[in-house]
Image (cartoon, helix red, strand yellow):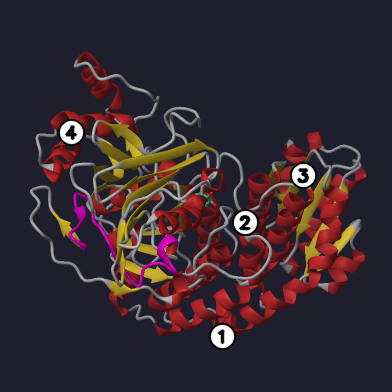
Amino acid sequence: MCGIIGCFSKEGCYEKLMAGLARLEYRGYDSAGVALLSPDGALAVRKKKGGVAGLAGAPLPGDTGIGHTRWATHGKPSDANAHPHVAGKFALVHNGIVENYARLRAELAAAGETFVSETDSEVIVRLIARLYGGDFFAAVSAACARLEGSYAVAVLCSDFPGQIICAKQKSPLVAGASGGDLYVCSDIPALAGAAEYVCPAEDGEFIRIAAGRVVFCDGQGKEIPKVFTRLTAASRAETGGGSFMEREIAAVPRALADTLASLRASDFAPCARAMRAARRVFAVACGTAFHAALAFKDAVERDAGVPVLCHPSSEFRYRDPLVGPGDLVVAVSQSGETADTLEAARLAKSRGAYLLSVTNVECSTLAALADHNVAMRAGAEIAVAATKSYNCQLLCLYYLAAQLTFFRCTRWPAWFSSLDALAPAARAAFDSFSAVRALAERLRGAGGMYFIGRGQDVRTAAEGALKVKEIAYLFAEGCAAGELKHGTLALVEEGFPVLAVATSRRLAQKCENALAEAKARGAYAALFSQYEDVLSESCADFTCRLPAVTEALMPVVAVIPLQYFACSMCLLRGYDPDKPRNLAKSVTVE
Ligand code: G6P
């Protein structure tokens, strides 16, 4: 987390840096800062605790600059801990974690360095300053060689006006260009509207902006030829009014239609063998993507008859999983940069498994690592809490489940012909929004809530609860309806909200029974279903009719009112849905 940016622009780069930082803010917003270098070598730094808006002031002079938005790891959010960090002639911004920082810090302190922050990042800039003997690139390269952990850094040196040296190891970094303006940045969406062409860096590579050119090189400074690709409109953030989260929910139908078109144009033949022969199927992901992975498990087990082992990425990597040659591992990540998922994917690959990724960012690290990437076309997602990318992840994973079924059982699941109904149904789900907002108004003061469901609805319940926790700051738990009576019910008292999702006719009655048991203990019961009779016969205090698609695809649609519910709760409680406290969208540290 943390976002870094660097910019060279002959006309001055302050405004461009600030605009870039604003677009990067979803990666962290504890503090922000910029450093600008003028052609005469003057270095100006402005940094502050709080968001990018807090940095506003008179433009700083300079044609070369670096900037940072922080999500604190080492050291609390404060002005001193904000980046850029400065040592002698150098200013540096960093995304990642230097794991051997304590040792390096002790060594530098013993050599006479005085530290002014608590960050791990400050050791990098002090190390560079110590190693500097007149060769800017050599000093950065030598310092990086001593670092353990992850980093994407951008560095200025007052002896080298017009230059930025960057290095990458396990944290994302891309270069961008547009006319004479040159950029480096943590990710591509933040360059949308600024850079016309982009190119991601790989681990161990350096990027050097100098003499009006951007060049990739190795640790010795030897140039690595690269091809820049044109930045597509798909990388742009949703425009319109309201928060990004509201816009991104509104974009779900478009995102589903684009993703379906892209899936239909994709060639799954390259992974046919791996799918057909897979000994076992694993799925790894974090947060929202993990809920999508669980939905994948439901579909594959039901349709292809193959057991799927689902692990949160952070657990997979540390539990010595039984993964090996002949296994298929599906890694799901909107950003394709989540450190835990990347490490899980690397582990799977190192053990000989076939790695399939599902990402929203085609030139992400995960997509590059995978043997095959399935691209969703949600478009840039800015709000920290994932919405449209979840609907698209579900669509991609169901599509993948259908391929697996075909390759293994030589038949397509019955629902496969109904995918075109998803986008219109998603749009129809918006009809419930005024009622859902009224529900949020009714529940805005609640101390917590449960979301329940059965079968595939357990995933939707878990995702609904996660959204409420993330942005409305309310305790919420998503659980299997049948589990309520095995402990969870103890917390239900007068007025405690229990929101049930019942999209499977076969299980609807069972879900309703659980809701009735909660209501008998005073719960405020809400029920979401596409079945009119289920809703009318229920005991619920609030009912929401979902648009109907074939049952197997209902999770894609059923989650939409819950996404909107969480967003409404957040806004009614006076919070910012786009920037929830303590969180960041792209978690590029462990
Ligand atoms: C963070 C975000 C979540 C997201 C998770 C996984 O925790 O706050 O919204 O679901 O990362 O992100 P990914 O990019 O891997 O899907």
* Residue 202 sits inside the magenta stretch: yes
* Residue sitting farthest toward the top: 110
Q: Is residue 122 visible?
A: yes
Query: How far apart, in angstroms, are the residues tagged by discs 3 and 2?
Result: 16 Å
Query: Label 1: which residue?
Result: 417
Q: Nearer the viewer, mark 4 or mark 2?
A: 4
- Establish if 135 lies above or below 393: above
Given residues 170 and 226, the one toward you in this image is 226
Seen at 80% across and 69% down, the residue is 432
Q: Nearer the viewer, mark 1 or mark 3?
A: 3
Query: Label 2: which residue?
Result: 459
Query: How far apart, in angstroms, are the residues tagged by discs 3 and 4?
Result: 49 Å
Within 8 Å: ligand 1 and the Cβ of disc 3? no
- What kind of residue is marked 3? Met
Query: How far apart, in angstroms, are the residues tagged by discs 2 and 1?
Result: 23 Å
| Sequence-first disc among 3 and 2 | 3
Q: Residues within 10 Å of mark 4 (few under 14, many from 20)?
A: few
- Give SS at disc 2: helix
Q: Which mark is residue 261?
A: none
Query: Label 4: which residue?
Result: 146
Seen at 41% across and 67% down, the residue is 194
